Amino acid sequence: MKKALLIFLSLLMVATVLPITGAAADEVVSAPSGFAAEPALYAHAVSGSDDTEAWQAWQSVHDEDFVVANPSEKFFFLPSSADKSTVDVYNNYDATVTVNGVQIPSKSTAAVPYAAGTAYRVNAGGASYTLTMMNSNAEAAIYINNPDADGNGTDLMTYLNSDKSLSAAATGAIVTPDGKVDNTPIKKIKGRGNTSWSKPKKGYNINYDKKVSIAGMEKNKKYSILANYQDDSLSRNRILYDLSDAVGLPYASDSRFVDFYVNGFYWGSYQMAEKVEPGSLVPEVTDDGYLNEDGTVKEDFPFIAEVDASAGDGDYYVSTNGMKVTIKAPEIDPGEVGYEEVKNYVKTKFSAFYNATTPSGDLAAVADIDSVAKLYLINELGKNWDCGVSSTFFTYKQDENGVYKFYGSPVWDYDNSLGNATGVKGDLNSFGVTDYEAYTGWWCRNKGKTGKRSSNIMARISLNNQVTAATPAIWFEDFVPAIEHFTGRSYSEDINTELMTRDAYLKYITESAAMNYGSGWLLNTGSWIADHSRLNKAAFDPETKKMVVSSTATRYYQNFGDMYAYACDWMDSRSAWLSEQFAPDYVPASLIGDTDNDGEIGITDATLLQRHIAGFDVPVTEEELLLRGDVDFDEEAGILDATLIQRYLAEIPSSNSHVGEYIRK
């Protein structure tokens, strides 16, 4: 494969081509810089731009080994910034080339009208080709260019893909749909991922020279660009990251759908995400936060730790309680001050955390119950294969009282979730799980189980008494409204704006996915992927508190739209099953002062109390009135309570009032 890739990408490398001067009046004064290849046509991301980085070469459909079956069929895979009717084309052939009636002299650029999906006949270099333009709708395009990554003329991707430890600097462009171009240089790009690194479509970590924003994201220097190769919806990571944010997990990576180009070659549809790093994503943790001003190691300090079974040589990790725990921050090199002290500190704290995850353990003494419960629920909702094994992050930091505790998150790596993977049969047999691909059945609770108990930290968290007491309310009051928002059934202004509806995500990814799979990537990448052809969808009935399963299976065909729909429908059905499980233990919180139980506090609530006091019939029971109407907690629902509600509405403070608080009885 490496040889095929080297041959394929060598077609895109030549000496620097300088911007054109003295061009004809109807030509665009622009040309690729530094990476323009062997004779080829190039298209720019933005019509009329003088930028020299955001160019792509025409290319043919390739297989997963980058072998081209039909080199006479060419495509421009255009980003969302490209004009939908005209594209700037640069001719790097030695003679004039005509595209759709427009003559483009050698080493010149011209605006070419086109219709997406139409094949145009092009004669160039003594050969005949067809050229078809495809358009994306992704939120941004990422261009990275370096034709000489090792100083010996090796193309950037050939160099990086040969060894995950290798890195290089580069130039490039970030282009948004409005045509804005950011040419901030790339300080370093290198490979990333564990099992995903072995796949032909790989992911990378990108470190820019300065902080940049990707399509409205908060500015950062460091990003991870995710291939989502094993996810036929290209969306599972994005959806679950944003859902985690919506339900209030402390740290969920913001991300955008992007198209990725390197040295003029279109690599596919990717997800540009905030890297799990100290700083902007986890502001409480810094790489030097473990040191006192005099350079000694602090007695206590925050850190980020990842449970990662694949940790090995080159990783900064400790082993404890049968787990490998990678120290993501502060990351210290051998020989630096605090190297061993930090490892010992993390091992001690994480061991205490693990030991507190027994069913009767006082987990609240060492961990934030709300966040670890939410981390468990995100993994249980997705039936995430990696739950508690890898990419399971915890942040150790101070709570509001200054007490150091573990918090669940950052969240990361959910491509093998939401019904995507088949799992490993041997592991499933040992766990006693026979329904892993189905949206029914417990998963995280059984992960790593051998006999009666599990050593998996997420399984242990899920069965801790303090967590099990908290999960029903968290599920119904945080997760269910967010999922209802995602499905489009119930819009809520209270939902974090990063979480969109399923239709909104689809709008940004459909055409980008068409380019991704049209360029040669496989929709079904192998036996690890579950059967996504049929699903008997389910819904939760709040009246009966039961899951209702459709008697007719929905059929999903082998195309991107259906694969995306399957992922969404599977999650929605899984939500219905979880709601049925948690419903018996859920006691809804009452809003103090909401005597009519309509979810709001208004003048009618005070009036209802006054009518009750006056002896009139009211549409609530005495028990309900006492629960929600006793706002001063004197065990009576009387005229003072009605007065306190009125003062609350008039924004007059009252020291003995609990109006607006929630109580669960």
Image: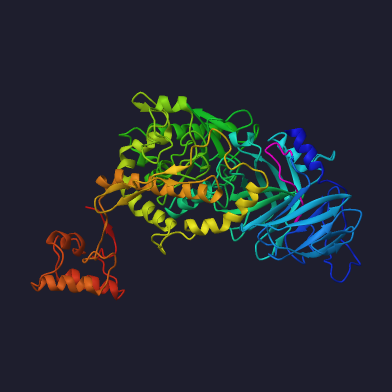
Magenta-colored span: 54-67
- Residue at image coords 26%, 49%: 545
Magenta stretch, main secondary structure, is: loop
Residue 550 in the figure: left or right of residue 253: left
654 and 601: which one is in front?
601
Asked whether 57 falls inside the magenta stretch, the response is yes
Return the residue found at the far bottom. Answer: 650
Q: Is residue 154 magenta?
A: no
Identify the residue at horizontal 68%, vertical 62% (top origin).
81
Q: Is residue 164 above or below residue 91?
A: above
Q: Is residue 552 above or below residue 456?
A: below
Q: Residue furthest left?
A: 615
Name the residue nearer the viewer: 282 or 561.
Answer: 561
Image location (x, y in percent) of residue 393: 50, 40
Image quadrant where residue 168 sits: top right
Q: Name the residue: 55% across, 59% down.
A: 507
Q: Residue at x 43, y 31 (%)?
A: 456
User: Residue 543: x, y in percent?
Assistant: 24, 54
Residue 452's x, y, as percent?
Answer: 33, 25
Asked whether residue 471 is in view, the answer is yes
Residue 510 lies left or right of residue 39; in this view the side is left
